Amino acid sequence: MGSNKHVRPNNAAGLAPVVRLLKRYGMEMDLEDERYKDAAYLALPATQMHIQALVSRCVSRFGLSKDLWLEAQAEGLLWRHPQARREHR
């Protein structure tokens, strides 16, 4: 949520926390395939859009009913509560 629109892992280590988070909800799809260990493949715009689509689908599925942003932070991802931006204006 919050900053999830900026999920752009550029290597397998950067993708790992995203996969762990999505896997908790059975939403990791093909992200554990070998091709995602290739930095060149991860750098492709189509690959980045696919990863973002999976993250967005997860966020949309749960909305505010789960604290996904806290789970993401526990994985080392820089997500914030979806209301945080509005509160600081």
Image (cartoon, helix red, strand yellow):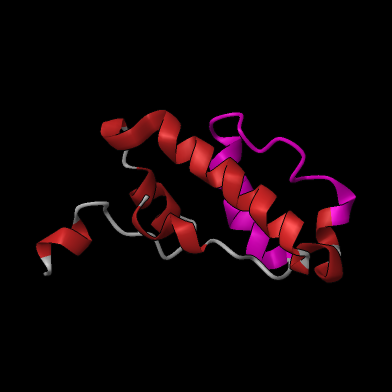
In the rendered image of this protein, does residue 70 appear above or below residue 25? below
Pick the front one: 31 or 6 = 6
Q: What is the quadrant of residue 48 in the picture?
A: bottom right
Q: What is the quadrant of residue 42 in the picture?
A: bottom right
Residue 26 placement, left or right of 32: left
Q: Residue at x 52, y 36 (%)?
A: 57
Pick the front one: 2 or 70 = 2
In the rendered image of this protein, does residue 8 appear above or below residue 28? below
User: Is residue 8 inside the magenta stretch?
Assistant: no
Residue 44 placement, left or right of 63: right
Pick the front one: 14 or 87 = 87
User: Is residue 33 inside the magenta stretch?
Assistant: yes
Give the position of the C terminus as an image quadrant.
bottom left
Residue 63 placement, left or right of 49: left
In the rendered image of this protein, does residue 15 appear above or below residue 39? above
Q: Position of residue 78 (x, y in %)?
A: 42, 65
Q: Position of residue 19 (x, y in %)?
A: 63, 47
In the rendered image of this protein, does residue 51 appear above or below residue 65? below
Q: Residue at x 58, y 55 (%)?
A: 17
Q: What is the quadrant of residue 74 in the picture?
A: bottom left
State the count of labels: 0
Q: Residue at x 71, y 35 (%)?
A: 29
Q: Position of residue 30 (x, y in %)?
A: 77, 39
Q: Position of residue 37 (x, y in %)?
A: 83, 60
Q: Which residues are magenta?
A: 12-35
